[in-house]
Amino acid sequence: MARAFLFVLDSFGVGGSPDASSYGDEGADTLGHIAEFCAAGAADRAGLRSGPLLLPNMSALGLMQAAKAATGRFPAGMPMPEKVYGIHGCASEVSRGKDTPSGHWEIAGTPVSFDWGYFPTEGDAFPPHFVEALCSATDVPGILGNCHASGTEVIARFGAEHIRTGKPICYTSADSVFQVAAHEKHFGLERLLGFCRIARALLDSYNIGRVIARPFVGETASSFERTGNRRDFSVPPPEPTLLDRLVNAERKVHAVGKIGDIFAHQGVSRVIKANGNEALMDASLAAMDQAQDGELVFTNFVDFDMIYGHRRDVPGYAAALEAFDARLPDVHRKLGPGDLVILTADHGCDPTWRGTDHTRERVPILAYGPGLRSRDIGIRRTYADIGETIARHLGIAAGPHGRSFL
């Protein structure tokens, strides 16, 4: 028996989704456009990075080939590796959404076949009777925002009024989500989490995928800053996922970062919290030391999406990719005979794209481990092939939605 390590680079799409036009995302390509901007010098920023996008470790695992499979072209300016060592390809998403739960559930073998509920883009975002019920149940004098918005912008806009009035800031996006920003000191973190739990229950009938608590600190618009105490309240997956199947087979699932929240804490043996990609990598490496035969370490690296993709920060995204890539040798040194590592993503969030929302893209699949033969697995029909590959590797029964590539 062996172990598996599944690392999701949140939003690291490689373009080429065949149904991107249905989502208004035809031509979106997170990796390709970041590489293009870096190659042209447009993604340079003083003191952060400069020059072409350099991801030597992921490139040696087949990232360039995965990108070409997805889009028909190699990313601009990135050096080709002398040799490819990993199993490499890409996958299309079949779930009916480009949100975080849909992507992660499909990775774990359970695509979303239903339509999520969404809030209108014009006028007030939230139904008056829902707002009234929420305020009554939580004893707040009202809400601020009530709109589609970027989180950092809506906090800057309404933060001072929130502190003065005690009204939480409620907003949404193109995803199926209800987000609540509140000050950790003036409103209180536990009060915010309680508010979100009540909102979660009230929104179940609307089929909203997530309620997200977005705590922040600071006293003025120029000093407001979101903290690492974010919490997601997701609906549970519609059927058992890879995580459930592993736990039912008496295996442990080590959930690092927001994985536990994404799966509504179903199929999770141990929750490991960390704030920021570097800390998430450190926590993942520690979990690798503790994981036993037959167990899964599952990590979401959220900074790519939350800090750089949604904020359309091309140089920041590029630098974060290079920093992640530089940590991969630390992962390699933790591997024992029979271990499997898979690097992938849950959707795209092209930082060159219009708006601030996710983009519908294929995702890379880079798999490797001692004794695994390098090969091209092409374009996989569904992300679920990733979960079924792990299921086969760990010796549990196959699920109904994907096929292993081992």
Image: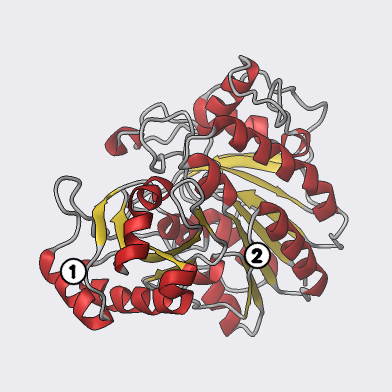
Q: Where residue 4 sits: x, y (%)?
A: 71, 64
Q: Nearer the N terminus, badge 2 or badge 1?
A: 1
- Kindly give the residue lying farthest to the top in the view shown: 40
Q: Quadrant of the C terminus?
A: bottom right
Q: Where residue 20 sits: x, y (%)?
A: 35, 35
In the picture of the structure, the residue carrying the numbered disc 2 is 274
Which mark lies nearer to you, 2 or 1? 1
Location of residue 301 (image quadrant): bottom right
Crowding near the residue tagged with mark 1, few <14, some 14–19, many ≥20 C-alpha atoms within 10 Å:
some
Is residue 291 at least partly visible in the picture? yes
Q: 399 or 18, which lies in front? A: 18
Is residue 74 at least partly visible in the picture? no
Residues at marks 2 and 1, CA–CA distance in whole angstroms: 32 Å
Q: Is mark 2 on a helix, strand or loop?
A: loop
Q: Is residue 221 left or right of residue 179?
A: right
Q: 264 or 401, which lies in front? A: 264
Q: Where residue 248 sits: x, y (%)?
A: 56, 84
Q: In which quarter of the image is the N terminus?
A: bottom right
Q: Identity of the amino acid at label 2?
A: Ala
In the picture of the structure, the residue carrying the numbered disc 1 is 131
Asked if disc 2 and disc 1 are in contact, CB closer than 8 Å, the reply is no
Q: Where residue 107 sits: x, y (%)?
A: 51, 57
In the image, residue 99 sits, relative to residue 318, either above or below, namely: below
Q: Identity of the amino acid at label 1?
A: Val
Crowding near the residue tagged with mark 2, few <14, some 14–19, many ≥20 C-alpha atoms within 10 Å:
some
The circle on residue 346 is none
